[in-house]
Amino acid sequence: MRSFVGIEIGGTKLQLVVGDERARILDRQRFPVERAEGAEGIRRKIREGLQRFRLHAVSAIGIGFGGPVDHSSGTILTSHQVQGWSDFPLQKWVEELTGIPTWIDNDANVAALGEACYGAGQSHSRIFYVTLGSGVGAGMVIDGSLYHSTRYAEMEFGHVRLDKAGRTVESSCSGWAVDEKVRNYVAEHPGTLLQELVAGVERGEAQVLGTALLRKDTAAREILEGTADDLALGLSHVVHLLNPEIIVLGGGLSLLGDPLRLAVADRLTRYLMHVVQPGPMIQISSLGEDVVPVGALSLAISKLLSA
């Protein structure tokens, strides 16, 4: 049985996995990303991680990179989080290191592919995936293939404007944006449940919303509904332009689960023209934190089969 390697290169974590022909993860290595070490530090960890795997049985390698890439040449264009990646030929570097065919794409794109092939988007032909993490990214899969534009960037959903003043989906709906909403509320309302829950939390304040919602906290509900409303407005543009069958919500914020999903689905319908109502199905990612590694495996598998 053939095996594949999937690599996730993010701004805070690096993951290397080995998977089978169904993108099931068989082995895993995870490393923190030390930004001070730059891209060279990440490449050193990739080299060390690959050496620990038995690569003689590996048929192909797929990589999901957290930033814009030229997928046709396998070159990193830049990273907004880690220095030293600009114009780096990552695909060539890995192939020379391993002797194994390698393909690379943006991490949101490979996540979309993973959800389409092995996650919540299975059995659907047009899948739009949104990652709600430190930033907001997206990818589109049509009939099993990633949509790519004529240039290097597509589906930049986080940069969709919500008003003429420059407010964007990312500035309003990313994990960091919701963290700030929670911090601001706590600063203005001492002695509340949210202040109690965020005590001792150094970053990622949005994670406490789930607990607060279970305890029927009004402030948590208001933050969730405001975020869902902005996200739904942004997604209405996606529906009017592309009208996918399903929209899959992933990333850290999606861990809020059904409260987020239902709020987005309810508000999305309100922003849609009548002929496309009620709009696409809204689902939470079924691959969770494995969405990029599984997507990277999916990329390797699909590219090898089509080569």
Image: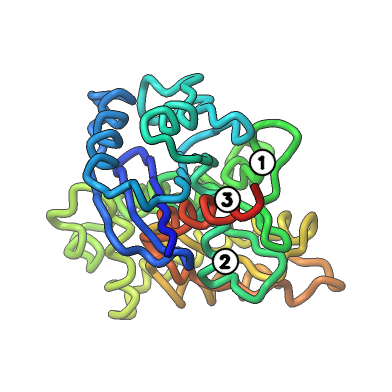
Residue tagged by mark 1? 154
Please give left or right for residue 163 compared with residue 131 in the image.
right
Point 59% across, 49% down: residue: 303
Residue tagged by mark 2? 117
User: In the rendered structure, which amino acid carries the disc numbered 3?
Assistant: Leu
User: In the rendered structure, which amino acid carries the disc numbered 2?
Assistant: Cys
Q: Residue 304: give its label.
A: 3
Observer-nearest of 213 and 61: 61
**Residue 16: in sight, yes or no?**
yes
User: In the rendered structure, which amino acid carries the disc numbered 1?
Assistant: Glu
Q: Are marks 1 and 3 in contact (CB under 8 Å)?
A: no
For marks 2 and 3, give the CA distance. 15 Å
Q: Quadrant of residue 248?
A: bottom right
The answer to which of marks 1 and 3 sits earlier in the sequence is 1
Q: Residue 238: give its label.
A: none
Q: Say few, some or many: other residues with alpha carbon within 10 Å of mark 1 (under 14 / 14 to 19 / 20 or more).
A: some
Q: Quadrant of residue 26?
A: bottom left
Please give left or right for residue 11 compared with residue 305 in the image.
left
The answer to which of marks 1 and 2 sits earlier in the sequence is 2
Point 65% across, 76% down: residue: 123
| Residue 183 placement (x, y as % from top left) | 30, 50
The answer to which of marks 2 and 3 sits earlier in the sequence is 2
| Residue 113 placement (x, y as % from top left) | 57, 57
